[in-house]
Image: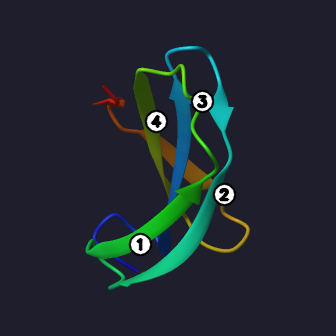
Amino acid sequence: MDRHGTIAKYKAIEITDDLGNEYHVEGNGGTGDRLQNFKWSATIGKIDEKATKLYIHPTIIFSLGEGKGHEEHKIETMEINLQ
């Protein structure tokens, strides 16, 4: 349990483009300690050739323990210029 009283933290990512396409994000796994340092990667399929920007919408999910629910915290959307 960390200083927030949480048991575990999970990351969720949604990726969209400037054309409105949504991309499936496949987690590849990663490593980290229980407090705050995580390194992990994910893969998406082919990006639409007409897209000029990708938008990454990250969310951190804090587990409050078995049967106690969770909290979701959205992080600022990141924009990647593909041109």
Dot 3 alpha-carbon crowd within 10 angstroms: few under 14, some 14 to 19, many 20 or more? few
Residue assigned mark 3: 48
Q: Residue furthest top?
A: 19
Q: CA distance from mark 2 to mark 3?
A: 37 Å
Q: Earlier in the sequence, mark 1 or mark 2?
A: 1
| Image vertical order of residue 62 relative to residue 5, above or below | above
Q: Nearer the viewer, mark 4 or mark 2?
A: 4
**Label 3 – label 1 distance at C-alpha:** 24 Å
Q: Earlier in the sequence, mark 4 or mark 1?
A: 1
Question: Which element is circle 1 on?
Answer: strand
- Dot 2 or dot 3, earlier in sequence: 3
Q: Earlier in the sequence, mark 3 or mark 1?
A: 1
Q: At which x and y percent is residue 47?
A: 57, 37
In this view, 34 is above or below 78: below
At 30% from the left edge and 25% from the top edge, which residue is drawn?
Answer: 83
Tag shown at residue 57: 4
Q: Secondary structure at mark 2?
A: loop
- In the image, residue 72 lies at what x, y percent? 52, 45
- Amino acid type indicated by mark 3: Asp
Q: Are marks 4 and 3 in contact (CB under 8 Å)?
A: no
Q: Residues within 10 Å of mark 4 (few under 14, many from 20)?
A: some
Question: Do labels 4 and 2 touch, CB within 8 Å?
Answer: no
Front position among marks 1 and 2: 1
Q: Which residue is mark 2?
A: 69
Q: Secondary structure at mark 4?
A: strand
Q: Is residue 71 above or below residue 8?
A: above
The residue sitting at the right extreme is 67
Q: Amino acid at mark 4?
A: His
Quadrant for the N terminus in the image: bottom left
Question: Which percent across, then down, holds residue 82?
Answer: 34, 30
Marker disc for residue 40: 1
